[in-house]
Image (cartoon, helix red, strand yellow):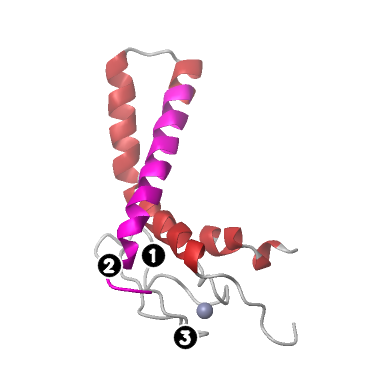
Amino acid sequence: MKLKETALYSILYQKCPHCHEGELWNSGAFNLKHYADMPEKCSQCGQRFYLEPNFYSGAMYVSYGLQVALFATIYVALKVLFDPPAEVYIVAIVVASALLFTLTYRFSRAIYLNFFVSYKKPEGK
Ligand SMILES: [Zn+2]
């Protein structure tokens, strides 16, 4: 199985989970005005990205998991490298969360959508 046929590809490259061709977002992740703009459906295969009203409420739980992983990574990295006072951990975690907010938002939605939509290999490939 090639990477392109796995859910990981759709998540890493922010592609439609059904065809892995269409984009999940209308703009770049660091366009702060439009980072959350997701098209209604895939431009390539027509897969709907909003499966039901308030579909992405569940992505909050994925986002929580990503944030905990981020906190743990920063904590362990600081502890091992510098062993600084407690305030440094708090500042580093808050700054990292703020800087990476749009990425955790997008990855949590992509992961959540991949729970419900699976890849379909195009005919003849
Ligand atoms: Zn698609």
**Crowding near pointer 2: few (<14 within 10 Å), some, many (20+)?**
few
Q: Which residue is mark 2?
A: 54
First-in-chain label (3 vs 1):
1
Determine the CA span between mark 3 and mark 1. Answer: 21 Å
Q: Nearer the viewer, mark 3 or mark 1?
A: 3
Q: For the C terminus, which image quadrant?
A: bottom right
Q: Which residue is mark 3?
A: 46
Identify which amino acid the numbered label 3 is placed on. Answer: Gly
Q: Nearer the viewer, mark 1 or mark 2?
A: 2
Residues 33 and 51: in front is 51
Q: Main secondary structure of the magenta part?
A: helix
Residue at 45% in and 15% down: 82
Q: Which x, y percent locates residue 42?
A: 45, 80
> Is ligand 1 closer than 8 angstroms to the Cβ of mark 3?
yes
Q: Which residue is mark 1?
A: 28
Residues 1 and 115: in front is 115
Residue at 33% in and 63% down: 56
Q: Quadrant of residue 107?
A: bottom left
- Magenta highlight range: 51-76
> Is ligand 1 closer than 8 angstroms to the Cβ of mark 1?
no
Q: Which x, y percent locates residue 95?
A: 30, 36
Q: Nearer the viewer, mark 2 or mark 3?
A: 2
First-in-chain label (2 vs 3):
3
As drawn, which residue projects farthest toward the left? 33
Residue at 49% in and 61% down: 115
Determine the CA span between mark 1 and mark 2. Answer: 23 Å
Q: Is residue 40 above or below residue 111?
A: below
Q: Quadrant of residue 51?
A: bottom left
Q: Is residue 33 left or right of residue 4?
A: left
Identify which amino acid the numbered label 2 is placed on. Answer: Asn
Q: Is residue 59 above or below residue 20?
A: above
